[in-house]
Amino acid sequence: MGLGSLASRVLRPSSTLLASRNPRILLHFRPIVSTTELHNADASPAQPQADPAPPPPRTPVGGARVHFSSPEDAIEVFVDGYPVKVPKGMTVLQACEIAGVDIPRFCYHSRLSIAGNCRMCLVEVEKSPKPVASCAMPALLGMKIKTDTPLAKKAREGVMEFLLMNHPLDCPICDQGGECDLQDQSMAFGSDRGRFTDVKRSVVDKNLGPLVKTVMTRCIQCTRCVRFATEVAGVQDLGMLGRGSGEEIGTYVEKLMTSELSGNVIDICPVGALTSKPFAFKARNWELKGTETIDVTDAVGSNIRIDSRGPEVMRIVPRLNEDINEEWISDKTRFCYDGLKRQRLNDPMIRGADGRFKAVSWRDALAIVAEAAHQVKPEEIVGIAGKLSDAESMIALKDLLNRLGSNNVWCEGNGPQPNADLRSGYMMNSGIAGLEKADVFLLIGTQPRVEAAMVNARIRKTVRATHAKVGYVGPSTEFNYDHEHLGTGPQALIDIAEGRHPFCSILKNAKNPAIIVGAGLFERKDKDAIFSVVENIAKLNNVVRPDWNGYNVLLLNASQAAALDLGLVPESVNSIESAKFLYLMGADDVDLEKVPKDAFVVYQGHHGDRGVYRANVILPAAAFSEKEGTYENTEGCAQQTLPAVPTVGDARDDWKIIRALSEVAGLQLPYDSLGAIRSRIRTVAPNLLQVDEREPATFSATIKPESTQKMDMADFGSTIENFYMTDAITRASKIMAQCSALLTKK
């Protein structure tokens, strides 16, 4: 008989007796059951325990990777019993991510300094008396970290309760709804109730300008925006005011946020305190279709995602690309999208005898263009590609003009006499990410803050991290890092080349010097002489070596690099003055005063911009958001746009229009699909087909013979007058017009 049944038999009479005396008392006894192993504990020897199975390998959070510069740097820590090797100096939070455990956080951001003030990332560490803020605690050898214990859970619930104490119940009317960190984490880590019954405090909204909408009552004081503005954007606009419950983020004095990167605070704000003003109340994020594509407003080629609903682009947000734009984009990239639906060209049009345009069919428009092209001499035919042209359309335009007997085709921004012989002469040879290795920068005739905001952010990051020196030659301009203004024109370059300038010693002693030349110099008549002096400076200061190429040209437009790779170089310098047939493919910044009055002008483009006013025939084309096209950025990386929305009206892709025109003109081009046109590109510039890969230049620009051209001593000018309006799309944008009125320095 078992021990349990014996006990129950002994106790049963007394229990029935108690129950009969007082029927409300019901006693429940749990029988104690013993196993045979315990009975025979002394009889049989203990079996040897098998080794526990090793824990299965985990995938790191967000594809996190670690790099050990040397094996001695590695230390082993245990996350929930799982061993993981991390480099010395890594935080507990980063170790947990490598171990595949996602720790909640609000204030921590991998690209900003550590604040440690939201306390959401609390974990339990063995031998530590209290929970530890994992974002600020360095991982130590043999540390045992527990992320899922009752103590850690209770700590997170407590933190979340305090965060929600003053947070308004705005979720139904908040633009962050659906992509809000506070929503997600209160669901995952918060308690099911709050104990706070007092009145919630409210905060006055700040006016940060036409781009960022503020609802500061929703702010949880994570200080991400303050750190971003100070560290990445380089403007001391935002700060923390007050103490305790009166603490708030503001600008101290009433002023707008004037940075060219200000829109990024929308992405890094974990709650709905900072949202997009133009996108306010337009759509919910689950209604949108995302298309991963490329930005074409400058030559950087930032990776973006276009969110659209039906035929309309609703917003543009950045994609992560460590080599190009990290996870930031400029305000022009982010907010120019409303220009894609304004002043668009819908139908082919012909200018009548009264000077007015009338809509016609594609057949009629192409027939008139083909007839006009055959009525002029081949040397009087000129084609100009615009700033936003893709490689496919530029090779088609070049092939068509070659078949018509003309070779006067070029891309705007490359100047009347571009030199396309050596690729290294118009590329950023060190690469955008490679700029972080430089310890001295010499900027010549370039203002990277307005010409390429993402390249400027990279230079600022390097200057902050390594205290790199920056020398600048050009007109006085604003920088957001320490620099030395060496001069305003070519004389300063001659002084540096001849070793007379104080900056020479800094260049000489530099380990990895980088020279960045602005593409605005392409427009100067004496550009060959200037580039010759720059190449001399590069030779004297060891800028180009087998292990480092610091000779860089910073281009301005998305089409420039591909145009030079494809050989869009005009035969004669004054071809536009003698043109009788001018084909403008989205070219709006050409000086049309030089075009003869009797010239026949065809404008093929997507916006009714400057080029339209002189056109005889208008052919509507697709914008970058509506077509598949190849673009090469300033560092020589080929990337492709993808169609996010359908084309407007009767518009067509640029290369298709040229292919149709060639057939009507009786000079049919030998391709009728994207695949066939890319095969044609392969014969001219195969690097354009290696998508998302950077093709470095084979030869250095310093092997060029010295120029005998006479140098003009006139100062360098500003290439971009207005950062917010540089092309047809941004000039049509209402948001960019507001920015231009409020934010540009008069």
Image: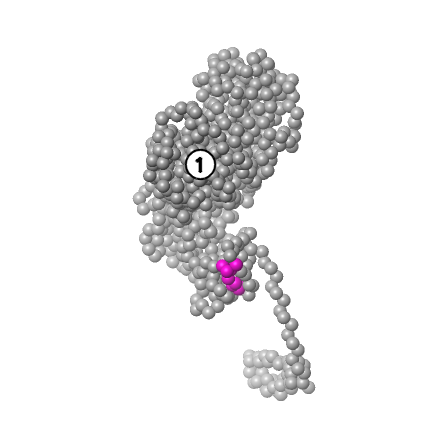
Look at the image and tell me in which quarter the N terminus lies.
bottom right
- Can you give x and y, in whole percent of width and height, for residue 290 in the image? 56, 41
Q: Residue at x 44, y 60 (%)?
A: 137
Q: Secondary structure at mark 1?
A: helix
**Relative to 96, residue 484 above or below:** above
**Image position of 542 (left or right of 671):** left
Look at the image and tell me in which quarter the C terminus lies.
top left
Judging by the rendered image, the residue that carries numbered circle 1 is 539
**Relative to 497, residue 461 above or below:** below
Q: Residue at x 60, y 29 (%)?
A: 684
Q: Is residue 98 magenta?
A: no
Q: Is residue 78 magenta?
A: yes
| Residue 340 visible to the viewer | no
- Can you give x and y, in whole percent of width and height, for residue 353 in the image? 51, 11
**Relative to 52, residue 225 above or below:** above
- Image colouring: one colour
Amino acid at the residue labelled 1: Lys
**Image position of 732 (left or right of 62):** left
| Residue 471 visible to the viewer | yes
Residue closer to the observer: 556 or 526? 526
Task: Label the magenta part by its dominant secondary structure.
Answer: strand
Q: Quadrant of residue 401?
A: top right
Q: Residue at x 40, y 51 (%)?
A: 223
Residue closer to the observer: 527 or 446? 527
Residue closer to the observer: 73 or 304? 73
Q: In this picture, which residue range is highlighted in magenta?
A: 71-79
**Relative to 375, residue 698 above or below:** below
